[in-house]
Image (tube, coloured by chain):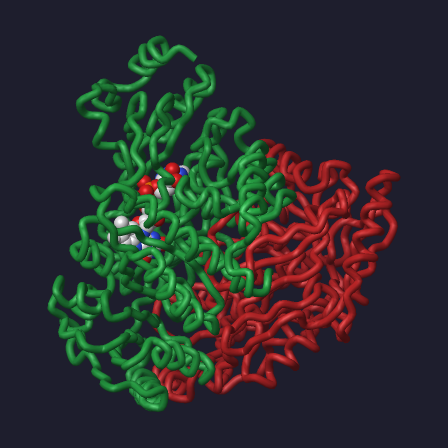
Amino acid sequence: MNPASFLAELRELLPADAIVSRQSTLPAWECDGLSAMKRVPLAVVLPTAESEVQAVLRLCLRHGIPVVPRGAGTGLSGGALPHEQGIVLSLARMKSILELNPLLRTARVQPGVRNLSVSQAARPWGLYYAPDPSSQIACTIGGNVAENSGGVHCLKYGLTVHNIQSLRLVCMDGEILTLGGTSPDSAGYDLTALLTGSEGLLGIVTEVTLRLLPLPEHTRLVMAAFNSTHQAADAVSRIIAAGIIPAGLEMMDNPAIRAAEDFVHAGYPVDASAILLCEVDGAMAEVEARTSQIDSLLRDSGASHIRHAETEEQRNLLWKGRKSAFPAVGRLAPDYYCMDGSIPRRKLAEVLDGIEQLSRQYGLAVANVFHAGDGNLHPLILYDANQPGELERAESFGADILALSVAVGGSITGEHGVGLEKIDQMCLQYQADEMACFHAIKRAFDPAGLLNPGKAIPELHRCAELSAMHVHQGQVPFPGLERF
Amino acid sequence: MDNDLSVDLQDQVQRAASAGYALAICGGGSQPQPGNPVQGETVNLTGHTGVIDYAPEELIITVRSGTPLTAISALLAQHGQMLAFEPPIFSAASTIGGAIACNRSGAARPWAGAARDSVLGCQILDGCGQRLNFGGQVMKNVAGYDVSRLMCGAHGTLGILLSVSLKVLPIPPESVTLARTCGADEAINTMNQLCGKPLPLTGAAWLDNQLHLRLGGSPESVRQAMHQLSEYDRGPDIWSAISNLQHPFFDRQAPLWRLAVTPTSGLPPVPGDWLIDWAGGQRWLSSPADANTIRQIASEAGGHAQRWHAGDGPVFQPLPAGLLALHRRLKHVFDPLGILNPGRLYAEL
Ligand SMILES: Cc1cc2nc3c(=O)[nH]c(=O)nc-3n(C[C@H](O)[C@H](O)[C@H](O)COP(=O)(O)OP(=O)(O)OC[C@H]3O[C@@H](n4cnc5c(N)ncnc54)[C@H](O)[C@@H]3O)c2cc1C
């Protein structure tokens, strides 16, 4: 590996404005949405075409240069964190919607297209792209595919994996593969599924065909306030048990409510211990019937206050508060650390109690935002990185929350990915044999190990060291809980 | 009903792995087209049965792979729930493992997703006899590669499914079939048009010059949709007969092909009879045409063809060289000795 000769050859391949290697400019790419981790890459490369991606990968392979793909850099697990000896391959300039087929209900897009712009483009045909991460104004479809992103409407409409039909993939050796298709299934293995959520470790996604859905005729958002988070959790179970799958079912606890209210003035009840946002969509009669059923379920669960969004503006405002909960909470403290545990829904109250206990133990406040309908928690830990030791405390607190999620039968990440952030916690969720299998899958695509190295799947010896550490201390976290 | 054979099955795979002989994985044996024939010692999964976990309010069920689909459906129905992908039930012996391994889905496929879309996690035996767990028993989990969905449609060539966790959904309280007379081209266009409208569709099929639609959902939404579709008459409930291949259409003598194609593609001029399902995406063709012609038709329509019954030659559409090479590398990851259903999918796997 000789960086100077690599850069010289790179300059022959691409126009000058597609390469950033000035030390003064590089820090713009030093981190993704997880700003606690920073690294400056050797260079940033911004191709505008698949053929350039292909040429860059071949060159990197020849020189043994690591490649970190990047979309908008909104990821929250350090997935797009640069490698010091490698390049950041930004797909941000490949941002065309190549084809929108209203009859077939598909959009064929380049990876740098922003999530929200797909729904905007499809709207004139009465169609939209369902997965709506809260970061949808900024995040890219390529990033969504790499993380298998979800949104507030994925309870009913599925995650990214359920809403994509095919991918074009450039492999590390420059080979271009088409995975999936516009037919309902394809010959051979389901590689589209394998690639979704693979965090940029298997190949570069250069084109995605998305499935579009008809816009619902009517939508109604119900907000309910509760005097305890347990009651709110109970209401979630009751709604699901009644056979209703709302379009969205979200929960915020008191600190999150206050922060969001300060931020967007949506009229959230700031004294409530928790609120639920429950959205129903469909034909008018359907929406009427479901909302009245939901109202009574909410009342039975002890809701202190129920409000319906009367206008589209009110509805958008109530969602805006929820969707901007991260930045809103971010104003409560100099720094916040967003977690992403996923748990069986019935464990919600138990896990909330556990988080509260940990919050006291670590002396750090926490605000909770959840995709309650599908058991995906986003505890936001508040800290001040300028106070010595607080970042480390926040990280240990977060690690404990993830260990708790795994201990109740859940996962360390519901939608943000492992990245570099949760690499150690992977050892809690998977055994050595499964991890070895993940490494072998990686080698099947990228034998040189140059695509996003060090992310998503820990080295086996790392897990062995960590588990030795735990045994050394003579205890595992949450010894009272059953192991899964 | 509750019978865990994991240890015996693991022993059987480990013996085969150390002696290096092939295994032919077998569920209920009810699949009309399980794939290319496999020579090997039978691994019988029908005794490996039972529900490991089912909490209706979680909308998740975890079952052993040999559990009959009828038993699972009956249990779910007691709680007003169902497998969203409505797996075809070819006979009382059909197992969940077979439905997942072959990625078989029913009438609601275009709206409710395929079998693979309902899968949340699984436990498998790989070709070395290791027991591996992927995914989980939660709705959302993006830790590690999505191996569970990779197992769907792999026809047992990447692992023996021991158990699967599946997302379940409430049974729509109301379900109605509508029908009207129309030709195939008009039907294809209409189905696709309707899919772009917010209607509670759970089925759209064409056969014998009739377009059939199924509406499913709350009484309110079904009533309103029927109002919007007033030019249709009530039609017969043909859906399970089509999914389970028990409709008289499937009694024809000529070879039967399953084509999965771009739903909007037109019907190509080829001798034979068509049954169009999945709003245009899945098409059954009973035709005397030769295999190459049919494979070409399918790929021109953006998809692939599977030989179903009668005729001869390989079952599945050949893969382009690059993809096949990747398949082989993945096969090697899970089954380095090549003992799990060798040749079932492709001779090279
Ligand atoms: C305020 C806020 C709210 C958020 N809300 C949500 C939410 O509701 N739901 C949710 O799921 N996530 C959410 N996220 C996380 C984040 O937005 C998503 O993970 C998003 O999909 C990342 O997209 P990106 O374009 O920013 O990707 P990046 O952060 O740039 O990259 C993410 C990963 O994808 C890889 N990658 C990017 N493009 C490609 C490509 N073309 N080919 C191969 N690999 C690629 C990168 O290497 C990296 O590993 C939120 C983030 C923020 C900051």
Nearer to us in this view, B69 or A274: A274
| Res A237 quadrant in image | bottom left
Q: Residue A376 sits in which quadrant? A: bottom left
Q: Quadrant of the N terminus of chain A?
A: top left
In depth, the one of A483 and B199 nearer the eye is A483
Which chain wears red? B
Q: For residue A286, which quarter of the picture?
A: bottom left
Q: Nearer the viewer, residue A434 or B70?
A: A434
Confirm whether residue A187 shows in the render.
no
Tell me where residue B136 appears, x and y as whole percent: 55, 59
Residue B189 falls left or right of residue A467: left
Q: Residue at x 57, y 84 (%)?
A: B79
Q: Is residue A55 left or right of residue A216?
A: right
Q: Residue at x 30, y 62 (%)?
A: A127
Q: What colour has chain A?
A: green
Could you tell me if residue A269 is visible in this image?
Answer: yes
